[in-house]
Amino acid sequence: MTFLFAYTHTSSHPILLRHRRTVGRLSVACKLGHRADYAQPPTALLRKESGCRLNRPANIDALMPTYSLRVNGRTHEVNVDADTRLLWIVRDLLGLTGTKYGCGIAQCGACTVHVNGKATRSCTLQVSQVGDRAITTIEGLSPNATHAVQKAWIAEEVPQCGYCQSGQVMTAAALLATNKAPTDADIDGAMDGLICRCGTYDRIRRAIHRAAKEG
Amino acid sequence: MTGPAQLHRREFIKVGTLAGGGLLLAIYAPTVKAHNSAALPFQPNAFLRIDPSGEITITVARSDMGQGVRTALPMIIAEELDADWNSVRVMQADAHPNQYGRMMTVGSSSVRNGAWLPLRKAGAAAREMLVAAAAARWGVSAGDLRTESGRVLHAASARSASYGELAEAAAALPVPVEPKLKDPATFKLIGTSPALFDTPDKVTGRAKFGIDARVPGMLFATVVHPPVFGSRVKSFDAAKAKAVAGVRHVVQIPTGIAVVAEHTGAALKGAQALVIEYENTGFAMNSSDIFKSFADLADKPGVEAKKVGDAAATLPKSAKRVESTYEAPYLAHATMEPMNCTANVQADRVELWAPTQNPQGAQQTAAQITGVPISNVTVHVQLLGCGWGRRSRQDFVEDAVHTSKAVGAPVQVLWTREEDMQHDFYRPAAHVRLEGGLDGAGKLAAMIVRVAAQPISGGGAVDGPAVASIADTPYAIPNYLVEYCRATNAVPVGYWRSVGPSQNTFIFESFIDELAHAAKRDPVELRRELLANDARMLNVVNLAAERSQWGTPLPAGRARGIALVDDKGGRVAEVAEVSLTGGKIRVHKVTLVADCGQIIHSGIVDGQLSGSVVAGLGAALYGEITIERGRVKQTNFRDYPMLRIDEMPEIDVHIVRNGEEPGGVGEPGVPPIAAAVANALFTLTGVRAKRLPLRADLFTPVGTR
């Protein structure tokens, strides 16, 4: 059974978002009975989603431009200021909360997404700079953690607190897409823009080597 | 809700006398309904529930910030229960004033100091009840039954029953008060390394941290706080902020100005457009003023924190005296997830989604601010993107409660990294003077230490954290005096991963090294001598020396240094192998030996210890918060750098397995690394670092930089 946060689809909150298609399987879905099912507030477990209708104040289009974004294979239209950072669109408007805020100045990498396959900091990327490039967030990297990097991350038990790991995984996946057998120096070069406060760097390195081997 | 499910609810309260409570039931209700069975779930205590299906739900009442309690604590219960680990799922407890005991997750305290006993008893009590239910069903003696992997077995008749099948009958039995616990030698699950429950969610983006809370109708906010400590908002102009598209409200709350918007991006843009005037409180100190004030305090005797023999009389008679002054800076926590909290304040109830180390404190805070009774304040504990002690505080909870109350809607308040760094409860800065006396044989005869620092703990003449790992050193010093000089200023200070030992171990273990060199003795040998009465710490030092090949030659340009700590029940020694390469301090290898007593999950312990080295090393090389005119100068990771992957040393972690009572794991690995590196740098260069952070230019001769 798939349950969705009602916030994303049914609230009267004028979040200035219009989906071109039905979004019945946005990745904020959580499965009841999942082994690690984190205690959700009762309000968060709502109902099976069938479609969405969003209220849009009539005057909004006159105030702000509309941007069409391709995120995880779906197209969304958002009405926001041109300088709105992609991070807040995916997190707060599309409900894709896997991408994290860490510093806001592209110094820590917690917000890393793929833009046309390239690891990119969504905290500094303005919506007006995205154009028609394809955006992939951690939710869209693979169905059910089947990407080689995710499998290796699980096998090596990389995460501690886990907050930075979406960015680490996305950066590692982008590295392996262009470099099938990275050396330690290659890994340093690709990953040294990211911060892990828990200090999981040794396991990150091992997991990248594992993903390269088993990918 | 169907009739049978309602019956379940009533029965549930009856059975779970320790665990009743409307919200818990509401959360469980879908599960009960899904089973749609007349059989009862079995819930002998607040921590455990066994469904007729055999699914075991273990409630974790401690906050997980990466130290793995959401897997390790269920392991303790499952061990005593003889559960099938594959049938165990984990549930995070909402805040409750007393149901789970203390929920505060600080000081590496979730397992040690007997904290694991209630969990062991919870599992053992349930096991005894299941066995009793099987004995009654089969008409045999409980003593003839054994349990294994979620089943009760009767060998003589080759009968067995699953815990799920026995749950209903067990629920009708009295809960044993003092169930028999296992002999640790027979543990099967504890000490192993099963897969962590949360890892799959953490690599797919599904894991829910504080900032991932989503509530119908919620708004997104940020708060601008007065930059000078102790200051308040005098006036503000919100016109430009309100003009930002998406900004809904700009409200003054007691802690600052909240900008509330339809998404965080708009809130941040609005906050930048605020024009705020602050009251002048008169606090305008710089870091140099603060350290000068500490030095002035240390000129005079402080309050006695430790006294052995007569150090004052012995020191003048020493064959050799060594005097030194060390300083450590303020440090920010800089948790990866900045401070945040989501609050929904309504007339008669409050609901919070908080990444907190102190759920009960958050509950009290919300009740105090709103006047809503505690019983109507629900606190959902989210995952924490690091804790480090920072999230034991309530300031970010206050922000969210005030803001939601002010705007009458659910609100998520997220601080910017800059606000987070400039409004922390910093690791206290310290000024420490040490004087040691060696006798003619090069033995440490006497030592006097005077610590000047702000107190964290508040009460008492001596601040325990300020003198921790100095006053309670494992070294046997025959004549020893430690004094504490209480400093006060407006800079907020607090608990920073490993607390007092994090700065004091750098200071104390550097000084022990100074004494060893002054006595022309090997630093490991002197430590062994001082640890003659502490077999476990001595064993750790010996193992660290052996595994690091202490005393054997290294390539040119490299040197080793050692340091140790006995902190929160964990005994840790670290040997660092360093060089100065290209004008940078490079730590190539760290050998870490830890005796933390009985460990629960070996993979977690390994990760906590190596992560602790990263935490301590990053702080040692880069960590410094400076105060300028009453406010913090640093703003973000650009000027408060962190250790990164290319600087990560090879870490050889060795865990001593001895079955002693469990000690702390999350913190004791942090303190030794700074001194181990500084001691290695002394061996390499002959220069002794007396301050943190360790700056490469201190050790690099002019002209060779």
Image: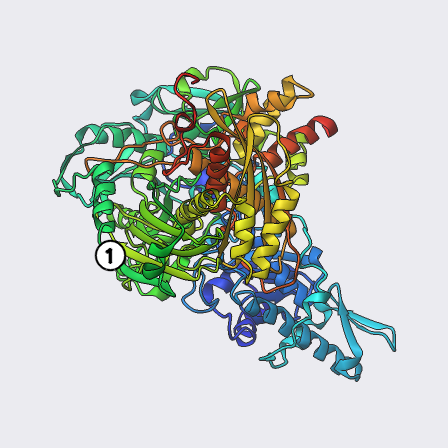
Q: Nearer the viewer, residue B290 or A18?
A: B290
- How far across and how far down the image is residue B647, in percent? 53, 29
Q: Report if residue B518 is visible in the image.
A: yes
Dividing the image into 4 quarters, which one contains the C terminus of chain B?
top left
Q: How many marks?
A: 1
Residue at 72% in and 76% down: B131
- Left or right: B397 in relation to B537: left
Placement of A49 over or under B33, stated as above or below:
above
Q: With respect to residue B495, does A192 lie above or below?
A: above
Task: State the image coordinates of residue B179 (x, y, percent, origin top left).
Answer: 63, 77
Residue B61 locus on image (x, y percent): 50, 60
Residue B184, quarter of the rendered image: bottom right
What kind of colouring is applied to the model shown?
Answer: rainbow
Residue A9 is at least partly visible in this image: no
* Number of residues whose C-alpha sits closer than 10 Å to that of mark 1, classed few (under 14), some (14–19) or many (20 or more): few
| Chain of the residue that carries numbered disc 1 in the rendered image | B
* Amino acid of disc 1: Pro
B211 sits left or right of B126 in the view: left
- Side of B124 relative to B10 (left or right): right
Residue marked by disc 1: B301
Question: Disc 1 on helix, strand or loop?
Answer: loop
Question: In the rendered view of the protein, which quadrant contains the N terminus of chain B?
Answer: bottom right
Residue B691 position within the rendered picture, expressed as x and y whole percent measured from the top left:
36, 38
Q: Nearer the viewer, residue A121 or B645?
A: B645
| In the foreground, B669 or B235 | B669
- Residue A72 appears in which quarter of the rendering? top right
Above/below status of B177 relative to A59: below
